[in-house]
Structure formats: structure tokens, C-alpha cells
Image (cartoon, coloured by chain):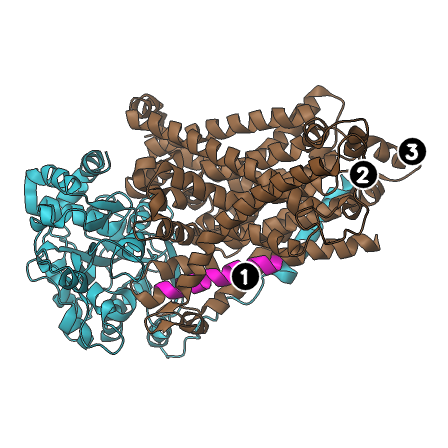
Chain colours: A brown, B cyan
């Protein structure tokens, strides 16, 4: 069923659109390849795409892994708030964040002295801004459940905290880190609004080029070639990440999240509920050093996330009459000539995102379940790995290609007398296509870490396959599913590319409404667009925090 | 396996239970007038299309047709989508193709003349804006607007500097580093400004852009970025007192309690934009589509256009708002490039512009 879903709502439209570029007057014409590759610009944008996606991924990882440690392994006041906070950038409309970033960096802004306006560094910084939370959550999901005893044993045998981290903990986390990195790479490689707003066309990527060739020049041949290039880059990245994962994936000893938590020495006076592991060999000073590095990296990252967000909030409070809440008051009325008020759009967003989350949890959960099994036969194993990669692809393919492809194939699909192209059903489906890979990447490392012997024991004792799933995988996966649901919900709430293409204008989602507002002249509408973005951020934070709580409550019951 | 099938069968009811899509469709206004044709039409338009609340409902009241609106993106995306889906059109009627994309729509025959023929009085008002090659009348002019260089009066007064007035002034050393505009490849006002320079400078337009570049022009990706971040009068901490915007933009800079705007448009730098409506070739409901084009020319819609879409109506029988009449007049001699030339040279011009301006 997941495969049919992927084939109908992703592969078919993409193949139709790319095919349109290569078939001219009924004949296959691949001349476009040599034409496009002979342009110096093509090579430059391929290089730029790789460079900014790799840099964005590396920096997100370097900042995000310590963040995952602090937010999922340590206990301190305000942790729940910070967990929700780091997810917020992930959902904000890129055009709003782009403008907020530029307001800081442009001449006259708070950070103008850095002279970063319009530079490559600014683009990479914005990519990190969007993806930091993704790394924290994906890695944190596994780290939280990692049994601390292996690390404690290493320490007891005399390893320093750094050595224990390098030889025990990080290898155990490698699948989650590789998964987070591949997700981040895909998001960075297909970043569109961020690149345009912050860098103009000087730093064009394969994604921006596909958009321009398709929507502005209608040069489908060039767009098709670029889509193939994009696919090659993405598949290459997935292969590298897949290799890194499979080399390190193995059964881990998992524990309940609570038992592994300890208070970081960042807040030394707050007593932790559990005694800090006191191992011989390394003194508490070393441990403190490790915590301090993590705390410092996280503080840096949080400050960096907060700056544009604070700028956004401050400007949303500025009105033509001075400071005040007028922009927020205006949200309850239909905005200007827009069809609905921001509150209506919020309700629409929440409902659509709920549908998309359910859909992506079902599809993504099934994929993770299938992929987590380790078949003996090599062919089947490769097939399973291929399935895993296939569901990552939607993140790496241009929304324009998928969107226009939809228009080509969804007119009376399968001879059915329905025109799916303008059906509101497609909005949650499109969002789910984006959210499924997030679900898979969050749930899979946890499922794979379950010792297969546990399942075998259960089966030997007479449990049916369904019962194995519900009693062995289920309880472990539940917490990961909570995290995955939060991410999926956030991704659906923030999804703009496909949604703007498909959403009915009389029922826009919140990001679509923000986009419409920001494009309209007038100081007041801009203030409203910012106020609406702040609402979007708050709603996201609340919902994500809620998702974190639900499975924990359920978990205690089990 | 059984488990998977089971979950599969659960999805559908689960979806329906919590769904936005499962909820009632957006209240289509019930047709009340008697003798109306009835049925639904689909309008395919750009993402700036908006009309005040109740106006589409009035259309339904008058004609019996309900309207579904589809907004795929900007004007370029709109035209290209119409071309791509020519064999199975998404809708019946389109609004928002402008004079920079008109030729592509006409060459690809994605629009056809309305049938029955239009009856609105404003048809003849709009005749002056028709695409010359469109003798059959497939594209009906609905509204017009000017893309113009804007200046921040307050800034120039404070800095005791004479304001620029023409395209030539913008390359003078006195205005070095003061002008922010938008990319011709990603922004429709940006492309309109490129056309303005081509209209004014002819073959010398690339030399003009080199001079602009040497004079420190800043090129943003889109209007929102230029206005909200870089323009001194845009509400942020911008540093550029000259911006590419619209002739109607000064209206938005009348301070609270003030009587006149703090900015103005340079009317010698304007490129005229015309937006058209048309019946989509192969429409399922061509009569409803024609009725909608008629409706766009009615006094009700024409009078609503300035407030909701920031354009000027083509109709001579409706009045534009007083502040528009006073502070945002259209250029008397706008710059223009024939639609056929734009279609023929668009790609080349954009390529050359990218090389010169983005380099």
C-alpha cells in the first residue's frame, strides 16, 4: 500500500513531467543534455547546490548533535520549552524568514557589521536555521532511549568521557545521525525561497533553476535535464548516507527515557532525581567539561535561532501608530480583500495537517516496520533498502516538477471520471508525501535497534506476528512515533510549495495566507503577515509540545 | 501482511473522521435568480487575484454560476500552466495574463474569444489596451497599472538632495548606492522595469544596466524584499531611498493624521502593465466563462479593483478612490514594448540581463 501511494502521488507525476521534456513530437530527444551541460552556468549551479547543501548539513549536524544531547539526555528547567522552540523555524514560511534574516543583515540591521548581506554564508546560515531542529529531534529520539550502561561500563574501565562518547555513544547514534544528515541534505539541496530571498540569482541552485526554466521560460527540456541532475545528486547523497547507516546499524540496548536522564552541570544546584553515574577513572570535572561544551554549543544555536525570531516579533508589534497589538487585532477580520481571516486559515491548517499526519504516520510507520526487518536473502535485503530510499526521494525532487506533473496526470486518473487536479483531497496527500520520510527516519533507528532475538523469543513462545509487533516493537516505537508525529505535523503545517499549488483559495492554509499577505503593498498588511507568522510559530510550538506529552502518558500505561 | 491490510482499511475512515476535506465544501452560494443558466465555472488566475467579500457571491446571484478559483502562482506560472494543460484544461476562464505574457498565450492558442460576445459597456473603454495582433479579441483588457521608480521625499528633504526624475538620473554619481530594484528573472515588476529600460534605451539598454550596476544598484529577488527590507520608506530600517515599485505605492505612505504621502512615483520611468481575462480553449462551460469576463468589466468589479488588487480599472464609468486620483496618477506617457517583441526576445533579453546585472 505505501508503494502504491508513492507511485501514484509521486513517481507518476514526476515521470510524466520529465518525459514531457525529453519527448518532442513523439520521438525521444536527449539532445537537451549536451545543450544544458555545455552551459558554464549549469556546472556552477550544480557545484553551488552541492556546496551549500553539504555545508548546511555539516553545520546543522555539528550544532545539532550537542543540542540533541542537552535537550534529550539532560534534565533542566525549560527543557520542554526549548524542545518545542527548536522546531519552530522548521515551519515558518521561507519568505518570512528570508525577510527577517535580511532585516538583521542588511545595512541598517542589527548585524550589519558582519557584512553578510547577500553572501553565500548568509544562505548557509539560513539553511542551518531551518534544519537545526530536525537534527536535534531525529538524533534526540534515539539518544533518549540509549541505555547509559554501555557508556558507564566504558567509563568504569577507565575511558574518559570524551573517549566514551567517541567509542561507545556516537557509533551507537550513527544511524540516527546519518538519517538526520540525509534529511537535512535533501531539505538544503531543494531549498528555494531561502536561496532566492537571501542570495538573489547569484547563488542559484538546481532547484531555483528548475523553477525559472519551468514557470518563467517554459523550457521543459532544460527543466527535465535539471530534474535528472537533481535526482542523481539526491540518489548519490542517499547512497552515501545509507552506507554510513548500514555499517553502524545494529541492535542496541534501549532503556526507558527516564532512567537515562541526568541533570547537566550547567545547573549544578538543581538536584537530579537519579544519582549521577559516578564512575572511576574520570572525575566529575571531565563530565562537566563535556556538558559545558554541549551547553555552550546549544546556547549558541538557540541564540542564533532566536535572533531572527525576536526581530520578527518586534516588527510585528510595530504599527503605523507606534507600538501595539493592532496587527494581531487585525487578524480576526478577513484581511483586506483576502477571503478568510487568519484564524479561519489557522483552523484549516490544523485540520489539513492532522489528516496529513495520520496519513504519514500510517504510511511511514508501515515502511519503517518493513524496512526494520532484516531478511536473510541478499536480494530481499537490497529490495528493502531500496524501499527505504524510495520514500526519501520526494524530499529531493523539485516541488515544481511534482506540481506540474500532477496537472498532467491527475485529470481523470485511471479513467475515473474525477478531476483530481483541483480536489481539496490532494492537499493533505501532498503534505504527507513530504512528511513520510521524516516519520521513517525518526522511527526506523529505534525499531532497528530492537534486538531481533527479542522478537524471535516472542515468536517461539507462540506470539503471532501481529502480537510480536504490538508487544515488542509497539512499546518501544510509541515514544518515537510521538516525536515523529510532532515532526510530521510541523512539516505539514509549514509545507508551502505543493500546498500553494493545490490549496483552494477560498480555504488557504496559514503559510499560503502569509505569503499572499506579504506580497501585498502596504505597511499594515506586512505587519499582519508577520503577526500571522508569529501565530503559526506559537501554534506549532504548542502542538509539538503536546505530541511530546501524549505518548509519554501512554507509555506509562503500558 | 494481514496486519498491513487491516491498517490499510482503517486509513480511509480515520481520514474521513478528522478531515477538513471530509467537511462540507465551501458554502457555494445557492443560485437564487430565476432563469439563470446555473452550473459552476472554474477561474484560473494568479496569486494576486482578490476581490472584496461578497462580489463573487453577487455574480452567482446574477447569473446562477458558482465560481471555483484556482491560483497556481504568479502570472508566468499561470500562463505556463495553461499551456501545459492545453489538452485537458483545468478551468473555464482565466484572469491575470498580462501584456508581458500575452503573446505566449495567444501563440499557444490557450484562450478563445468569448461566446456569446461581450456586452459590458466597459469593453470599448478597454479597447485601447488590446494586444494589436489579437484581432479576434481572445484577451479582454480588465485593468492597468504602472511599474515606476519611487522616491522617498522625506529622505531626500532630510539629506538636502535633489530627487532624481528620470532613468538617466539614476546612473548619476549623486545617486550612487541609493537605488534598489528587483530581479527581472524572478519578479514581474523587475521584468517590467527591464522592459522600460529596453523601451527607453533601445539597443543601448545593456550599456545602461552596466552603468546602473557601476552606480551601485541593489537587485533583490522580489518586491516584498526590496520594499520591506531595503526601502527607506518601507517600514524597516532600509538604506535605499529609491525603489522600483508601482505608481500606486505612494498612497500607502500617507502618515496617520497626515494629508499627503511622504513618497512619490517618477512618472517618466513607468512601464504600463495591462491584465487580461480570457475564455480558456476547450472550456467545459464557455457560456459561464463569457459571463464571468462580462462581470469583470461591470461597475461593481471595476470599482473594487483599486482597493483589492492595486490596479486601475479600464472602465471610464467608475471613479478611482480620491487618494488615488490625487496621489497615484497613471503616467501620461508610459514606456512600452510591443507584446510580439516581448514574446520573441524574452529568453534572450533575460539571459543578457542576467549576464550584465547579476554577473
User: Residue A477: x percent and y percent?
Assistant: 74, 44
Asked whether residue A138 appears in the rendered view, the answer is no
Would you name the residue on which mark 3 appears? A460
Task: Compare residues A312 and B308 and report the one nearer the observer.
Answer: A312
Among the 4 quarters of the image, the one containing residue A65: top right
Callout 1: helix, strand or loop?
A: helix
In which chain is the residue bearing label 2? Answer: A
Q: Which mark identifies residue A538?
A: 1
The quadrant of the picture occupied by the N terminus of chain A is top right
The picture places residue B359, in percent across and down from the top left corner, at: 23, 33
Q: Of discs 3 and 1, which sits in the foreground?
A: 1
Mark 3, chain letter? A
**Which of the marked residues, 1 or 2, is nearer the chain's N terminus?**
2
Magenta region includes residue A531? yes
What segment carries the magenta color? A526-543
Q: Which residue is labeled 2 in the image? A: A278
Amino acid at each position: 500500500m505505501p508503494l502504491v501511494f508513492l507511485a501514484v502521488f509521486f513517481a507518476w507525476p514526476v515521470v510524466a513531467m520529465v518525459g514531457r521534456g525529453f519527448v518532442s513530437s513523439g520521438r525521444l530527444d536527449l539532445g537537451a543534455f549536451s545543450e544544458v551541460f555545455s552551459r558554464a552556468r549549469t556546472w556552477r549551479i550544480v557545484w553551488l547546490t552541492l556546496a551549500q547543501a553539504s555545508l548546511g548539513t555539516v553545520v546543522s549536524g555539528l550544532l545539532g548533535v550537542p543540542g540533541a544531547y542537552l535537550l534529550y539526555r539532560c534534565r533542566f528547567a525549560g527543557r520542554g520549552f526549548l524542545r518545542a522552540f527548536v522546531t519552530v523555524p522548521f515551519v515558518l514560511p521561507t519568505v518570512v524568514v528570508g525577510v527577517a534574516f535580511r532585516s538583521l543583515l542588511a545595512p541598517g540591521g542589527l548585524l550589519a557589521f558582519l557584512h553578510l548581506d547577500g553572501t553565500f554564508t548568509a544562505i548557509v546560515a539560513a539553511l542551518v536555521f531551518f534544519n537545526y531542529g530536525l537534527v536535534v529531534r531525529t538524533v534526540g529520539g534515539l539518544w533518549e532511549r540509549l541505555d547509559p550502561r554501555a557508556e558507564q561500563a566504558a567509563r568504569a574501565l577507565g575511558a574518559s568521557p570524551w573517549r566514551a562518547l567517541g567509542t561507545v555513544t556516537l557509533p551507537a547514534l550513527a544511524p540516527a545521525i546519518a538519517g538526520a544528515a540525509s534529511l537535512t541534505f535533501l531539505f538544503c539541496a531543494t531549498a528555494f525561497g531561502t536561496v532566492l530571498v537571501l542570495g538573489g540569482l547569484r547563488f542559484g541552485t538546481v532547484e531555483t533553476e528548475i523553477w525559472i526554466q519551468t514557470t518563467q521560460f517554459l523550457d521543459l527540456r532544460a527543466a527535465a535535464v535539471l530534474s535528472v541532475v537533481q535526482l542523481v545528486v539526491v540518489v548519490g547523497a542517499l547512497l552515501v548516507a545509507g552506507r554510513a547507516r548500514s555499517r553502524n546499524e545494529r541492535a542496541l540496548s534501549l532503556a526507558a527515557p527516564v532512567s537515562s536522564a541526568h541533570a547537566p552541570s550547567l545547573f549544578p544546584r538543581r538536584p537530579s532525581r537519579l544519582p549521577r553515574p559516578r564512575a572511576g577513572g574520570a572525575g566529575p570535572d571531565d563530565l562537566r567539561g563535556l556538558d559545558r561544551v554541549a551547553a555552550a554549543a546549544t546556547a549558541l544555536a538557540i541564540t542564533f535561532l532566536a535572533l531572527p525570531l525576536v526581530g520578527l516579533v518586534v516588527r510585528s508589534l510595530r504599527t503605523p501608530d507606534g507600538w501595539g497589538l493592532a496587527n494581531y487585532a487585525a487578524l480576526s477580520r478577513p484581511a483586506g480583500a483576502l477571503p478568510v481571516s487568519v484564524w479561519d486559515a489557522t483552523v484549516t491548517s490544523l485540520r489539513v495537517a492532522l489528516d496529513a499526519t495520520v496519513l504519514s504516520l500510517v504510511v511511514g510507520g508501515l515502511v519503517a516496520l518493513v524496512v526494520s526487518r532484516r531478511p536473510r536473502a541478499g536480494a530481499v535485503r537490497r529490495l528493502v533498502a531500496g524501499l527505504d530510499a524510495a520514500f526519501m526521494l520526494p524530499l529531493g525532487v523539485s516541488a515544481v516538477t511534482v506540481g506540474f506533473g500532477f496537472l498532467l496526470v491527475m485529470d481523470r486518473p485511471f479513467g475515473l471520471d474525477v478531476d483530481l487536479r483541483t480536489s481539496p483531497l490532494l492537499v493533505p496527500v501532498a503534505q504527507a508525501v513530504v512528511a513520510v520520510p521524516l516519520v521513517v527516519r525518526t522511527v526506523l533507528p529505534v525499531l532497528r535497534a530492537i534486538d531481533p532475538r527479542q522478537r524471535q523469543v516472542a515468536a517461539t513462545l507462540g506470539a503471532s506476528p501481529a502480537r510480536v509487533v504490538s508487544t515488542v516493537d509497539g512499546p518501544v516505537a510509541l515514544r518515537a512515533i510521538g516525536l515523529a508525529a510532532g515532526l510530521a505535523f510541523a512539516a505539514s503545517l509549514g509545507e508551502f510549495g505543493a500546498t500553494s499549488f493545490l490549496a483552494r483559495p477560498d480555504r488557504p492554509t496559514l503559510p499560503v495566507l502569509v505569503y499572499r499577505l506579504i506580497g501585498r503593498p502596504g505597511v499594515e498588511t506586512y505587519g499582519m503577515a508577520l503577526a500571522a507568522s508569529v501565530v503559526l510559530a506559537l501554534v506549532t510550538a504548542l502542538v509539538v509540545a503536546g505530541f511530546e506529552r501524549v505518548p509519554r502518558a501512554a507509555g506509562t500505561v503500558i | 501482511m494481514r496486519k498491513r491490510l487491516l491498517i490499510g482499511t482503517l486509513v480511509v475512515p480515520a481520514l474521513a473522521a478528522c478531515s477538513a476535506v471530509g467537511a462540507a465544501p465551501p458554502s457555494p452560494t445557492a443560485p437564487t435568480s430565476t432563469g439563470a443558466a446555473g452550473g459552476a465555472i472554474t477561474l484560473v488566475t494568479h496569486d494576486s487575484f482578490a476581490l472584496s467579500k461578497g462580489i463573487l457571491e453577487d455574480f452567482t446571484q446574477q447569473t446562477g454560476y458558482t465560481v471555483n478559483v484556482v491560483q497556481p502562482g504568479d502570472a508566468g506560472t499561470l500562463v505556463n500552466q495553461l499551456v501545459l494543460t492545453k489538452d485537458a484544461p483545468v478551468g473555464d476562464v482565466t484572469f491575470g495574463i498580462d501584456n508581458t505574457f500575452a503573446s505566449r498565450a495567444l501563440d499557444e492558442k490557450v484562450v478563445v474569444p468569448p461566446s456569446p460576445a461581450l456586452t459590458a459597456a466597459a469593453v470599448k473603454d478597454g479597447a485601447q489596451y488590446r494586444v494589436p495582433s489579437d484581432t479576434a479579441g481572445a484577451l479582454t483588457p480588465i485593468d492597468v497599472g504602472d511599474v515606476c521608480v519611487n522616491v522617498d521625499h522625506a529622505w531626500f528633504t532630510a539629506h538636502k538632495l535633489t530627487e532624481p526624475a528620470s532613468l538617466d538620473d539614476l546612473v548619476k554619481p549623486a545617486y550612487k548606492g541609493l537605488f534598489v530594484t528587483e530581479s527581472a528573472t524572478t519578479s514581474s515588476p523587475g521584468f517590467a522595469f527591464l522592459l522600460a529600460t529596453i523601451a527607453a534605451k533601445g539597443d543601448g539598454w545593456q550599456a545602461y544596466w552596466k552603468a546602473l550596476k557601476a552606480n551601485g544598484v541593489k537587485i533583490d529577488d522580489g518586491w516584498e524584499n526590496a520594499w520591506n527590507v531595503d526601502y527607506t520608506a518601507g517600514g524597516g530600517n532600509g538604506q535605499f531611498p529609491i525603489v522600483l515599485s508601482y505608481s500606486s505605492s505612494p498612497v500607502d505612505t500617507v502618515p496617520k493624521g497626515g494629508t499627503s504621502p511622504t513618497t512619490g512615483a517618477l512618472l517618466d520611468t513607468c512601464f504600463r502593465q495591462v491584465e487580461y481575462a480570457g475564455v480558456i480553449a476547450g472550456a467545459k462551460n464557455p457560456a459561464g466563462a463569457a459571463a464571468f469576463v462580462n462581470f469583470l468589466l461591470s461597475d461593481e468589479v471595476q470599482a473594487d479593483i483599486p482597493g483589492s488588487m492595486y490596479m486601475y480599472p479600464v472602465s471610464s464609468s467608475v471613479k478611482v478612490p480620491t487618494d488615488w486620483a490625487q496621489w497615484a496618477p497613471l503616467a501620461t506617457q508610459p514606456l512600452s514594448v510591443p507584446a510580439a517583441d516581448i514574446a520573441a526576445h524574452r529568453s534572450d533579453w533575460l539571459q543578457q540581463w542576467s549576464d550584465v546585472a547579476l554577473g
